[in-house]
Amino acid sequence: MSQQATPARPTRRGRLARIVPLLIAVWLVLEIWLVTVVAGWVGWFLTLVLLLAGVFLGGTVIKRAGARAFRAAVELSKDPQSAQPQTGTSMTVLAGVLLILPGFLSDLLAATLLLPPTRAVWRAVARRLTGSVLRSTAPVGADRFADAMRLQEQLRIHRPDGKIVQGEVVDPPAGPKGPDTEYRPPIAP
């Protein structure tokens, strides 16, 4: 006699993991439909030119966002106490990626991420979403996104504006109070 193995019960996926593939499929169908509608109005050649212009514009947006973030990082390294305004790089890069994706619906969404009034709305939505995830009472391991957000909060290194900075206090040795003339190696980064 052979033994039949009982089938293992599949692990239950979260609601988001079940909905995301459906949303992506609907998004793709809408993009294809919109491209065909626009091509019917203005012709296939002009539609192709518009899609290629979106790719180049998206690359330019990403390049400028990276340069702005680099300048902000250099300025912050020169003067860590300066109050740097947020550069909004993540939303700008996301807008650039959406512009690079072929389709007019993604280009419209990218435009809402680039315009200041709608960018503020997207920023508020993102803060609300991440705040609800951080306050989530889901047990550790149940929601991967919540776990990643909690880990990011735990690993964040805070600036010296009253928040905790990990370090060690070293007291100088008690000795003569004369000039310090002994060799000290340079501090390596």
Image (cartoon, grey):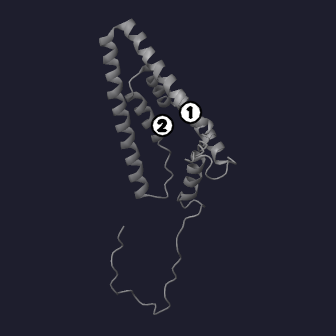
Q: Is residue 109 above or below residue 187?
A: above
Decide which of 62, 32 is in the foreground and name it.
32
Disc 1, SS: helix
Which residue does the image show at 36% across and 24% down from the upper left? 54
Residue 66, image x, y percentages: 37, 42
Q: Is residue 52 above or below residue 44?
A: below
Please state, as top left, top right, bottom left or bottom right, where the C terminus lies in the image: bottom left
Q: Is residue 179 above or below residue 162?
A: below
Which residue does the image show at 56% across and 33% down from the upper left? 122
Residue 176, image x, y percentages: 45, 93
Please, what is the three-letter code of the amino acid marked with disc 2? Answer: Met
Which image quarter: residue 20? top right
Task: Specify which label sits upstream in the sequence, 1 or 2.
Answer: 2
Left or right of 134, for residue 183: left
Rounded to the nearest angstrom, the CA distance separating label 1 from label 2 is: 9 Å
Q: Which residue is mark 2?
A: 91
Numbered mark located on residue 93 in the image: none
Badge 1: how crowded within 10 Å, few (<14), some, or many (20+)? Answer: some
Residue 52, image x, y percentages: 31, 23
Badge 2: how crowded within 10 Å, few (<14), some, or many (20+)? Answer: some
Left or right of 134, for residue 180: left
Disc 2, SS: helix
Report whether residue 120 is seen. Answer: no
Residue 140, image x, y percentages: 63, 53
For the residues bearing labels 1 and 2, Cβ distance under 8 angstroms: yes
Please, what is the three-letter code of the amino acid marked with disc 1? Answer: Trp
Report whether residue 59 is seen. Answer: yes
Which residue does the image show at 35% across and 81% down from the upper left? 184
Q: Which residue is mark 1?
A: 122
